[in-house]
Amino acid sequence: MRFFGLKSCDTCRKARKALTDAGHDPQVIDVRADGINAADRAAIIAAFGEQAINKASTTWRGLSDADRIRDPAELLADHPTLMKRPVIEAQGRWTIGWKPDVQAQYLP
């Protein structure tokens, strides 16, 4: 299991703790410190498209109109913190966010 998020994100911290408490040992990728490699970025965009971009984020609000219409993969390459979080990859299956439907897939 791989966990893409931010160390400073409250939702990511809650999700990581819940996963660990449930017996999972996720490999944590901090998108600010570690970035998102091209293959993972492509898989995330393939799975979620524009929904991978957090349009409520401070980073998004700071973008110009020209930047906002760019391809989501390019945006994530330049601004990895724009990714909606957390993104979890487990056994080839990708999930995004930490709503009850996602929690139900990983927690007993």
Image (cartoon, grey):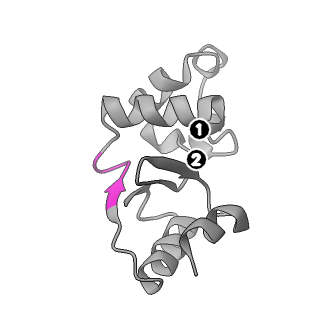
Where residue 45 sits in the image (x, y, percent)?
52, 30
Please report whichever mark, 1 or 2, sits nearer to the chain's N-terminal start. 1
Is the Cβ of the residue at disc 1 closer than 8 Å to that at disc 2?
Answer: yes
Q: Where is 96 relative to 26, above or below?
A: above
The residue positioned 56% from the left and 40% from the top of the image is 59
Q: Amino acid at mark 2?
A: Lys
Where the C terminus falls, by quadrant?
bottom right
| Above or below: residue 44 compared with residue 14 | above
Amino acid beneath label 1: Ala
Q: Residues within 10 Å of mark 1 (few under 14, many from 20)?
A: many
Residue at image point 33% right, 55% down = 29
Q: Which residues are magenta?
A: 28-34
Calculate the distance from the C-alpha at mark 1 to the C-alpha at mark 2.
Answer: 5 Å
Q: Residues within 10 Å of mark 2 (few under 14, many from 20)?
A: many
Q: Nearer the viewer, residue 68 or 100?
A: 100
For residue 106, side relative to residue 99 (left or right): left
Secondary structure of the residue carrying numbered label 2: loop
The image shows residue 10 at horizontal and vertical percentages of: 55, 69
Could you say where residue 103 lies in the image, as x and y percent from the top left?
62, 69
The answer to whether residue 3 is left or right of residue 107 is left
| Residue at the spot of label 1 | 52
Q: In which quadrant of the rendered image does the N terminus lie?
A: bottom left
Q: Is residue 72 visible?
A: yes
Q: Residue at x 38, y 48 (%)?
A: 31
Among all residues in the image, which is located at the extreme front? 91
Q: Is residue 62 visible?
A: no
Q: Which residue is mark 2?
A: 84
